[in-house]
Image: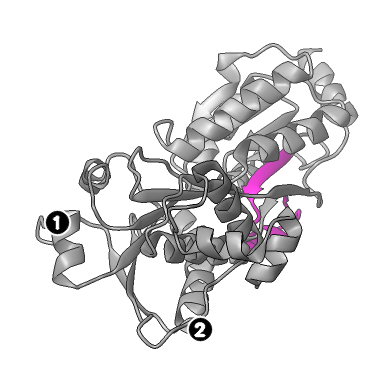
Amino acid sequence: MAKIKEIAEKMNISVSTVYKALSDAEDVNPETKKKILKTAINMGYVAKRKGDNHKRICVFIDQPEDNHVQYFDYEVMMAFKRNAIHSGHEVSIMSLDYTLNHSKSFDELMDEYQFDGAVILGLSNFNPYFEQLKTTSHPVVILDNFLDNPMVASVCCDNMKGMKLAIDHLVDLGHTRIGFINGQNDAYVCKERLGGYISSIALRGIAFDPELVCNGNFTEESAAPLARHLVSMGVTAIMCCNDMLAIGAIKELMGMGLNVPGDISVVGFDDIKLSSYITPKLTTVHTDLSQMGEKLFIVLELMMKDNRLDMSLQPSYLEVRESTSTVNSRAEWLDSRSG
């Protein structure tokens, strides 16, 4: 984890300026403070623990039964919890279910349990708490979503860059008819990744065809009928909004007698641990989930010290494995069907 001196050296500014910015001093230019906070987050800065620095933090989980939450958010949550406990904080984990919480408002929950801050994983826009978070007065950090409230910060993977890397990989392999299996079309992360898909194919000179975009719900099971539809539309590759959808698509394609990647290439997003254990091993956009959990903690610590942040991006890169190949064999298969 970075020290104040290392942040100062990285930014070529004085140690005192960094210290004052991280302490929310008023005599630091707001733009400079914002840049320092961003750098501190990216470098992994955590303040030294003081005797009175013990905080009560809650990790709220929306839709805990969702496979996407179980695989993706679990890894993030455990990394967050490790960092928080190491820094002397107390961490609780609760479901963000309005009914289970006896219809108590978000602020009522925070006050009742005396939480100093909260992290929310898997937040759905349909959750009643979503609207309440727009006016909360408690420091909150949400994962892969965004709310217009200075008390709510966001940590997201770089969806646009990740999608561009995936699409470029497929186009470089010769694919121009690329289907997209999305998650819930109202979810922030899905809107981001769909936007990345559309802009990325456009940059490679491929016209957008709305018939090649299907909406699932993040689950493996929802991918099956969507994969069948995309096969009927003559795609040679399928880009998926997350790894569970990609795994479901691969199972369905193989059940149809198709070879992955010989007939159709498939790419996922997130790189959950399961991705490297399936057959074929999944080519996917990698996000370091452990680092994302650490970044959630760093951002929340800064928020609890009265710093105000908006969005922090976690870098993404493409992990090329076994589920993608050149377009040639699939094109021949399509020709044989039409003949």
Start-end of magenta stretch = 266-283
Q: Secondary structure at mark 2?
A: helix
Q: Nearer the viewer, residue 36 or 242?
A: 36
The C terminus - image quarter: top right
| Above or below for 140 versus 231 | below
Residue density around tag 2, few if under 14, some if 14–19, many if 20 or more, within 10 Å: few
Amino acid at pointer 1: Thr
Q: State whether residue 336 is above or below residue 3.
A: above
Between marks 2 and 1 in the image, the one whose residue lies nearer the viewer: 2
Q: Which residue is mark 1?
A: 99
At 85% from the left edge and 39% from the top edge, which residue is drawn?
325
Q: Quadrant of the N terminus?
A: bottom right
Left or right of residue 321, residue 141 in this image: left
Label of residue 172 in the image = none
Q: CA separation, marks 2 and 1?
A: 33 Å
Q: Between 325 and 301, which is closer to the camera in this rendering? A: 301
Amino acid type, label 2: His
Indicate the quadrant where residue 213 lies.
top right
Q: Residue at x 52, y 45 (%)?
A: 29
To which quarter of the image does residue 307 belong? bottom left
* Viewer-side residue, 65 vs 135: 135
User: Magenta stretch containing residue 194, yes or no?
Assistant: no
| Residue drawn at 50 percent across, 73 percent down | 78
According to the picture, the residue beneath numbered tag 2 turns out to be: 86
